[in-house]
Amino acid sequence: MELADILFYVFAALTLLCGVLVIANPFSRNPVTSAMFLVLTIISMAGLFVLLHAFFLAAVQILVYAGAVIVLFLFVIMLLDLKEEERRKIKFFGVAAGLISVGAILGIFLKNLHATNLNAQSSPSIEGDTAALGKLLFANYVLPFEVVSVLLLVAMIGVILLSKKKLD
Amino acid sequence: MHVGLEHYLTVSFLLFALGLLGVIMRRNLIVIYMSLELMLNAANLALVAFSRFNDKLDGQVLVFFIITVAAAEVSVGLALIVALYRRRQSAHVEDLTSMKL
């Protein structure tokens, strides 16, 4: 087994374990704990991106998700008073229904994965570094790039409007 | 056994299922939102894996756009949650029943 394969299993296990702890932590139901495990999930997923030679995306993943998004989550958790979470009970019916439906969907996914001939390259050679990605982004994908910048502006204006004290 | 596309896809599917389970099971709006982020990340992982094993960078450009849109979505969604909390004093889905018959 190569080092990359061992690292894949380590990062995959870490991603899934922290993902489980985000949604169902047996020790604490505090949203802050969930946010912290979400950071760990995202960082180990950046490790998987590096193993897939997507270096730029790994850096963006850590900068944008672990840096900006989680800080936003923590800020909102801090703003809201969420102590009530502790004493509410999870309903058994909801958990059972969720497990059954998600299990069925996962079964469909994995069955189709095994049934399909993926036709993948055995020795891929692309490198997702900044230069290659930037060339593609500013040559073939200029229009989506500009549209996304407009989307960010719209989101910013929307958030300012939403967070004003009086909506009318 | 050599790690290939199917291994990455399996991880991606499992992570997506975890996120979906969180959305169905949890009752706190903020945790539901984190589960949504988990599902988006699962899709990103699948796209990067496809991009790698098909020798094309286009998938990674798509992931770049998805990350940008997700950041915008998170900011708008959290602003909505804060506005909702201001009006209702609750971030629990069980308390938001005004559209129930």
Image (cartoon, coloured by chain):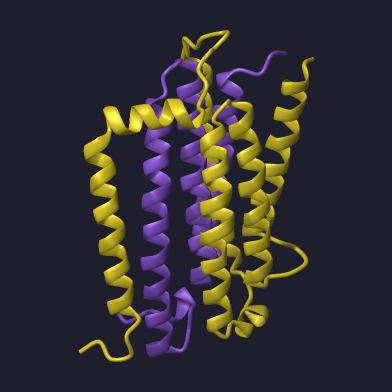
Q: Residue at x 42, y 38 (%)?
A: B63
Residue A114 in sight from this viewpoint: yes
Q: Residue at x 56, y 76 (%)?
A: A77
- Is B41 drawn above or below residue B54 in the view shown? below
Image position of A6 (left or right of B57): right
- Is B36 drawn above or below residue B61 in the view shown? below
Q: Nearest the camera: A67 or A111?
A: A67
Image position of A95 (left or right of B97): right
* Residue A167, horizontal then vertical, whole percent: 25, 87
Q: Nearest the camera: A56 or B55?
A: A56
* Residue A17, horizontal then vertical, whole percent: 71, 46
- Is A121 drawn above or below residue B42 in the view shown? above
Quadrant assignment for the C terminus of chain B: bottom left
Residue B13 in sight from this viewpoint: no
The chain painted yellow is A
Q: Residue at x 46, y 47 (%)?
A: B40
Q: Residue at x 52, y 26 (%)?
A: B49
Q: Number of callouts in the render?
A: 0
**Looking at the rendering, which quadrant does residue A50 occupy?**
top right
Q: Nearest the camera: B65 or A35?
A: B65
* Residue A43, horizontal then vertical, whole percent: 65, 47
Quadrant assignment for the N terminus of chain B: top right
Tell me, what hue is chain B? purple
Image position of A168 (left or right of B79): left
* Residue A59, horizontal then vertical, whole percent: 57, 42
**Looking at the rendering, which quadrant does residue B13 occupy?**
top right
- Is A136 drawn above or below residue A125 in the view shown? below
